[in-house]
Amino acid sequence: MNHYHAEEEILGKAYDSRLMRRLIKYLAPYKLYVVISIILLLFISILQLAGPYLTKIAIDRYIATGDVPGLSRIALILLAILIVIFFLRYLQIYLMQFTGQRVMFDMRMKLFSHLQEMSLSFFDKNPVGRLITRLTNDIEVLNEMLTSGVIAIFGDIFSLAGIVIVMLWLNFKLALISFMVLPLLVYATVIFRQKVRKSYRAIRVRIARINAFLQESIVGMPIIQIFNREKKNLRKFEGLNHHYLEACLRSIFYHALFHPSVEIIGSLAIALIIWYGGSQILKEALTFGVLVAFIQYVGRFYRPIGDLSEKYNIMQSAMAASERIFKLLDTQVEIKDPELPLSIEGIRGEIEFKNVWFAYNGKDYVLRDISFHVRPGEKVAIVGATGAGKTSIINLLARFYDPQKGKILIDGMDIRNFPQKELRRYLGIVQQDVFLFSGSIEDNIRLGENRINSQQVRKSARYVNADKFIEKLPHGYQEEVHERGSLLSVGQKQLLAFARALVFDPRILILDEATSSIDTETEMLIQNALAKLLQYRTSIVIAHRLSTIKDVDRTIAMHKGRIREVGTHQELLKKKGIYYRLHQLQYQPQRNKSVV
């Protein structure tokens, strides 16, 4: 079992004071609603106690004596109580549902805000499915606790306490007879709680496995279909689905067994009441009204006890969910802004790496003693085999990660002294795998930036020749982009990425394999746009296709995390080193040479 499934399996205690104190902080803004709700539950419990007692009065005082007007008055009082209970119950449910929804809203906002501040290394270690579960399922479980669990427990406790007091007051001996079956009920509840806890754990683990498999299968559907894996995947899903079904059926079995058991125990209590109470009536030591009232009270007594066992499971699930949520909220942000950040009013675009060492896991360095200098407005290319460390340089420059050793300077200042948002405002990155959001073409170019108007969006698109395919779309710039731009070609998405980078007018432009997936025709379209895009900007171009970097000022050739060569295209070809071998592999593929 992997860590994700093991984490879902943890249930914990039904009540944890430490977690509850933290949850109460989210309830604090709505404490008035909570207090009113608890008071309403108290009144509802008191009013519900009146029903059986009024029945006793109706039987002993009015039915036995044939007093019809008195019986009518009792009926009207009962009707009035039922109407009042209806409105009080409506108000109580509405207040708690409103409070639960507001708390969920606040927690989701807090959690999502925290996730957006996390460093990329955090997302490297945490599956997307787990994070989505925290934002949806786990928070929904807390809502169930607030609306149907912790507050509703007060109503059950008020009802139980009131019923016990009234029964003891009406007839002490008959009350004790009624409570004789309580040990059976306690035993059944304990067994049910243990069994349901195990089945609930199994359900959590198995639904987590289904979610993980579904996410992987849907994202990887092209691979599944091209390799004819549909039947194998269906069989695997059938197995996962069957295990989940078994866990759910086991839980249903325990519920189906427990609730009739409670009813049977309650019926046994009623039988004892009828047996003992009936004998007392025959001896004229008890009235018939008291007997009927006891039967009604016993029926109401066992209902909240059964509800409490359900609420135990709700509380237990909520404690486990809150444990996971707070664990996520307590995760520290690795890349932090300095306490006294430097202000960036404008930069020239000078970049310098000084003896930079970097490892993603803290042990295996992917960059080793990297030092280079890029002058303002200079265009520098970085080339090398896969795994040479090219993209890691970009991640460090954008401060998605911090190096373990060395410094990265912009205009002579360490980038760790800048606010991250300010730093990234001057950077434009075009990646090979372009991510498009749901929304229109225009929205994806300006990314919701209000200061960028439609005219600027269209100008940028024309500049990089993206307007040619955009204007052919049925709705032009307002054409809706499907999930991740699935209906656009790779080349079209990359043209949009160029337009996006241009419209934000960055001082430093980074192209990370930005033309590696573009066909020859599309590449010809953007070559001219690239020249204009790179003009007057400090540019770092990472490329596998050497044809796209012939006109840069310098090229840095990397191998196994180190800089091996620096020079112009012609200078590096003359050295006949790494760059030369890469060139040979691309332009003379018949020669089976490898990069040293």
Image (spheres, helix red, strand yellow):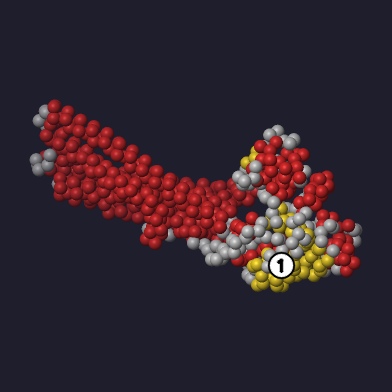
In the displayed structure image, the side of residue 332 where residue 220 appears, left or right: right
Residue 10 position, x and y percent, is 47, 59
For disc 1, the neighbor class at 10 Å (few under 14, some 14 to 19, many from 20) is: many
Residue 71 lies, with reference to residue 374, above or below; the image says: above
In the displayed structure image, the side of residue 476 where residue 112 appears, left or right: left
In the displayed structure image, the side of residue 388 where residue 62 appears, left or right: left
Q: Is residue 523 visible?
A: no
Q: What residue is shown with label 1? A: 352
Foreground pick, 26 / 345: 345
Residue 519 lies, with reference to residue 344, above or below; the image says: above
At a point 63% along the width and 59% down the height, the residue shown is 345
In the displayed structure image, the side of residue 114 where residue 311 appears, left or right: left
Q: How many marks?
A: 1
Q: Is residue 547 visible?
A: yes
Residue 228 position, x and y percent, is 72, 46
At a point 12% along the width and 42% down the height, the residue shown is 286
Residue 399 lies, with reference to residue 306, above or below; the image says: below
Residue 294 position, x and y percent, is 20, 42
**Which residue in the rendered view is the most extreme toward the top?**
68
Q: Quadrant of residue 282?
A: top left
At a point 70% along the width and 33% down the height, the residue shown is 474
Quarter holding the C terminus?
bottom right
| Local SS, label 1 | strand
Label 1 amino acid? Glu
At a point 12% along the width and 39% down the height, the residue shown is 287
Foreground pick, 383 / 536: 536
Foreground pick, 581 / 512: 512
Residue 585 position, x and y percent, is 86, 60
Quarter holding the N terminus?
bottom right
